[in-house]
Amino acid sequence: MTLSSADEALIQAVTAANPRTIVAVMAGSAVITEKWREAAAAILMLWYPGQEGGTALANILLGKSNPSGRLPCTFPRRAEDLPPFDRDARTAVYDLWHGYRKLERDGVAAAFPFGFGLSYTTFEYTELRVEQETLAAADTIRTTVRVSNTGTRAGDEIVQLYVRALDSKVERARRELKAFSRLHVEAGAFAQAVLQIPVAELAYYDVERGWVVEPGRYLLIAGRHAEDSALERVIRVE
């Protein structure tokens, strides 16, 4: 899951000579960057961008575009933080504990969490509001988050809403992404992100009963990524 030793040596040599070095990584999955990430001034994850990838990269480096992408997976510090992998195995079981769910359960911080991403401006979250704090299984959770652009450039922000079942009688993840909203905010301005979650999507699957929505308290967590808890509110499902 690391770059080749030659690539890592090159990055280390260049960043040692010039700390204002940007590392652009083209890869199709998470990359472990522990040997060099602290030395880089910035890291751009290109994925596999296609024939216009060079244009997109140039526009970001030159400031013509303000990046707003978010990681769709967890970038761990160590391979050991992920589920074991055996390329010769004939069967494999991937249960609930993988990605950000596993790292949070284990108390391990990611190098770059699920949902992480930076831009050329900064944002502040305030006022997580819930339309209704007690709901039935047929209802929809409706929330708003005030997002302020505290920087000097217009940009897009991806507000993420995670949920934790506080009173569950079964083993469940401590947080799961249930909704997100992308919005454009001018410099110095603010906007309202609207996020909705049908209560039915809070269910877990029981092999005998099917999908089950447990009554009890649920913690709503609004943040910028899977390790951010900028705003929290508790609701109840009856």
Image: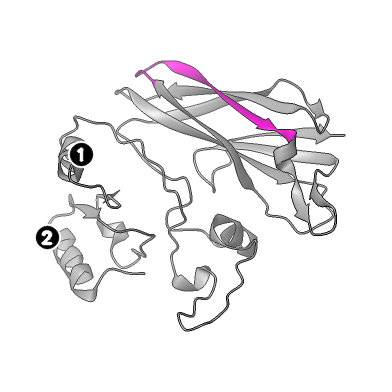
- Does residue 128 appear in the picture of this structure? no
Spot the residue most to the top: 189
Residue for point 83% across, 44% down: 214
- SS at badge 1: helix
Residue 183, image x and y in percent? 44, 24
Residue 51, image x and y in percent? 18, 46
Residue for point 31% across, 58% down: 38
Residue 32 position (above or below residue 140): below
Taking depth in this image into account, of 199 and 15 the one nearest to the observer is 199
Residue for point 22% across, 47% down: 50
Quarter assignment of residue 156: top left
Hey, what amino acid is under mark 2?
Ala
The residue under label 2 is 17
Quarter assignment of residue 36: bottom left
Residue for point 60% across, 57% down: 101
State which quarter of the image contains the C terminus: top right
- SS at badge 2: helix
Q: Is residue 70 within the magenta segment? A: no
Magenta residues span 185-199
Main SS, magenta residues:
strand
Q: In the image, which disc is placed on residue 56?
A: 1
Residue 135, image x and y in percent? 81, 28
Hey, what amino acid is under mark 1?
Ala
Residue 35 relative to residue 93: left or right: left
Q: CA distance from mark 1 to mark 2?
A: 27 Å
Residue 27 relative to residue 218: left or right: left
